Structure formats: structure tokens, C-alpha cells
Image: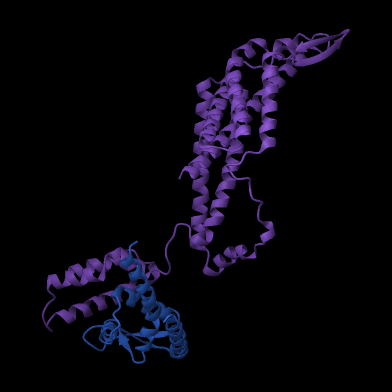
Chain colours: A purple, B blue
Amino acid sequence: MDLIERYIHAVGERLPERSRRDIEDELRSLLMDALDAKTEPGKPYAEEDVIFVLKEFGPPQEVARRYAPSPQFLIGPKFFDTYLLVVKIVLGAVALGVTISLAIDFAFSTPSLGDVIGRLLSTLISGALSAIGSVTIVFAILERVLSEKEQNELAQAEDKWDPRQLPTVPHRHSRVKISESVVNICFIALALAVLNLFADKVGGFFHDGTWRFVSFVNQQAVAIYRPYLNFLWIVSLFHHIVLLVKGKWTTGSQVLAIALSLGGIGVLALMISGPSLIDSLAIRSLEGVASGEELKKLAELLTMIFRFGLIGALVAVTADLVRKIVGLVKVVR
Amino acid sequence: MDYTDILRNLIQELRRGTLTISVLSQLREPQYGYSLLQRLADKGMSIDQNTLYPLLRRLEQQGLLDSIWSVEESRPRRYYSLSPLGRRALKEIGEHWHETVRVVNRLLEEEN
């Protein structure tokens, strides 16, 4: 009967090749036995009976699944924890790689603000996605290719754990470390002082006949960035003082921390795309100390190093921001 | 999950534990899939077709059952029966069963 054959074919398609023919034959025999019980001998099977028997047997996908050797996971329970661990490691590597490649790129070009933020986001995201995809595929293959025995051997590494190797308990999110707050406050106060009062005092002493002081810092650039940095740092100072006084984190503090991180990213991007803080002209004016060529190279080198530093800070702040957001989401859930 | 679902799951779990031993017990003589289904149902053990047939294959793969395609009757049918290993397994699991029943009964009695 046509319906029966179609059913058997539908089940067969979903069966492993090796046992397919055999299971199909058996299925046919069993279906017909069931139909025989409903039909008088010699008479053809009635369509309603066929439909009834087939429906009672169940949908082809389900029937095929029952004949499968074991539950089919993309990545099974034995490997899943290892998989997550590898994903975390790989993401860290991707972040590092992105930092280096973007740093090289931005150092040798003049990106606009939009460029910096756009490229940072898109490169991080696409890098992360393809990394996760590759790891997933590798583990999916492992899941299917390794025999039971090999799987058990791999999974058994877990059994050999030692309680002494467990990490120490991190200070709970809610408690504030006093030392951390104090250190932060001091550093921000220092940074504010330098930015507003001593910006022109950052430089070096040089001897070319007499001792001279030359500031490495481009005052015009400082003037551009000063208001943003002031705002960011003053808010941050306020944030840390509040934390110190209160003694614990609140959701509001965490949100503010996230906002500050975003602000930090914005300012960093601005500084990367805008004029450099390093005053190349000032450096090159040190004629007595070294040759014009050497000075020029020094200036370029300092500028580039500074830029690398800014980009590194940018990626670090972005990664920290992501961590903060994940942490906040977990708590809120 | 409400109570009815939870209870149903508990019952299913219990039945799942008794399936294999029930099936093995009826295969001292050769049976084909459908006849075995009927036989178990007649004796009060109703099994879903979709559970029984794959189970028979698995037991054969494990070496507890032998099977042959018989073409004697009107249509070819696959007959299963206990292998020598299967006979031994049935005897031993049967002993475990009696022991288990004894222990669980005692545990349940203590409740009262």
C-alpha cells in the first residue's frame, strides 16, 4: 500500500545508513501485523485502518529518533563545560588580537571619531562571532567522532579534582573594598591636578649648554580634551567617594560605573582620532641635544607609543564594560 | 509542573525500570514483535510499540537476544528469542528483582 511505503520511507530517511534497510523491513512487517489484526483475512487493508495504525505508531521523526543509538546533542553534557571554557579563552585571545591589529592600523592612519568606535565594535563583534563558531564546530565534530570510551576518558579528567585548588571566594559584588576606593580617589585627584594645574610641567630637562625644560605636552590638544576629562574624572571622583561612604555597591552605582565606562570609551576614541597630546614640535625644537633626524624619529615614536597606549586602554575599557553589563544583567535576573 | 504531571512522571520512571526484565521474561520461546506486544498486553504489561521495537533491537545488539527472519508464513517476520547470554542475564536480573522488591517493600512498610 502506498501510504505504508511512504511512511516507511519517511522514517528510513532519518535512520543511519547501516541499519536503515533492516529497520525498514522490520517496520513493514510490524505495520502489516498490526493491520492484519484489524482486517479480515484475504481482504485488502482499509485506508482508515492504515491511517489509524500509522498515526498510532507515531510521526516518522519520532520513530526514527527512538531507533537512534543515543540522544543527539550538538555538544553533549560531557563536553559542554570544556566547550564553555575554551570559548572564554578564545574570546580573550580575539580581544587581544583585535587590540593589536587595530592599534597598528590606527597608529598609521588618521581615523575619525566615528571610524574608531565603528571599527572597534564591528571588529570585536565579527571576531567574536567567528571564533565562537569555529570552537562550536570543532566540539560538534568531537561529539560525533569520538567513541564512547574516548569520550569517557576525556570527561574523566573532572573526577581528579582537588578541593585545595578551588579559587578563593571573590569579594561579593555588594561589598566595597576600602583600599580600592581610597587608591582610586587619590589617583583621580592627582590626575585632575596635573590636568588643570601642571599640564605644562610634563616634560623633561635637557642639557644643551644650559639646563632647559621642555614640555612634551601639546597645550592646544590638552585644552581640547580638558573639559571632557575634567567632567569624567570629577563624576568618577564623586562616584568613588559615595562608594567609600556607603560601603557597598548598589544597582545605581553599577549603572553609574557603566555610564562612566561609556564616557571613558568616548573620550578615548576622541583622543585617538583627534590631535595627539604629544607635542612633536616641542621635541623637535631640542636642537642642541640631538640631530634633527633623531628628534623627528623620537617624536614620531613617542606619538605612536602614546597612541598604542590609548587604543589598548580603549579595548580594555570596552572589555571591562562588557563584563560590568553581564554582571549587572545576572544580578537583575 | 502540577501534581498530576509529577505523579505521571514517577509512574513512568517506575515502569521504565521494569520494561527490559518483562520483555526478556517472555522470550524463552521465539516471538515476533507484534505477538510479543500482544502477549505482554494480555498479561497486563502494556508497552508502547515505539518503545518495544527499538528495545528489541538494542537487546539483540547487546547479545541478549537472537533473531532470525522467518519466511515460513504468509509474510517474512523477524523472530526474537533469548540467547544463552540472555537466559543467564534473565536469571540474574530476576534475582536482583526479587531482592529489590523485598527491600522496597520493607522501606514502604516502615513508613506505616
A290 relative to B44, above or below: above
Q: Residue B11 sits in which quadrant?
A: bottom left
Relative height, residue B79 to residue A1 (above, below): below
Q: Is residue A191 above or below residue B40?
A: above
Q: Quadrant of the N terminus of chain A?
A: bottom left
Displayed quadrant of residue A2: bottom left
Where is the C terminus of chain A found, in terms of image quarters?
top left
Q: Residue at x 63, y 13 (%)?
A: A221
Q: Horizontal and vertical percent for residue A29? A: 26, 78
Q: Position of residue A94 (x, y in %)?
A: 58, 40
Given residues A184 and A70, the one toward you in this image is: A184
Rendering quarter of residue A24: bottom left
Q: Is residue A88 visible?
A: yes
Left or right relative to B110: residue A246: right
The x, y position of residue B45, in whole percent, is 30, 82
| Residue reaching furthest to the right | A209
Residue A137 place in picture, x, y as percent? 49, 52
Residue at image x 65%, y 24%? A307
Q: Is residue A12 visible?
A: no
Q: Is residue A123 left or right of residue A176?
A: left
Is A183 left or right of A331, judged from the image as shown? right
**How many numbered circles are shown?**
0
Q: Please tell me which residue is depicted at 18% across the width and 81% down the height of the picture.
A: A37
B91 left or right of A318?
left
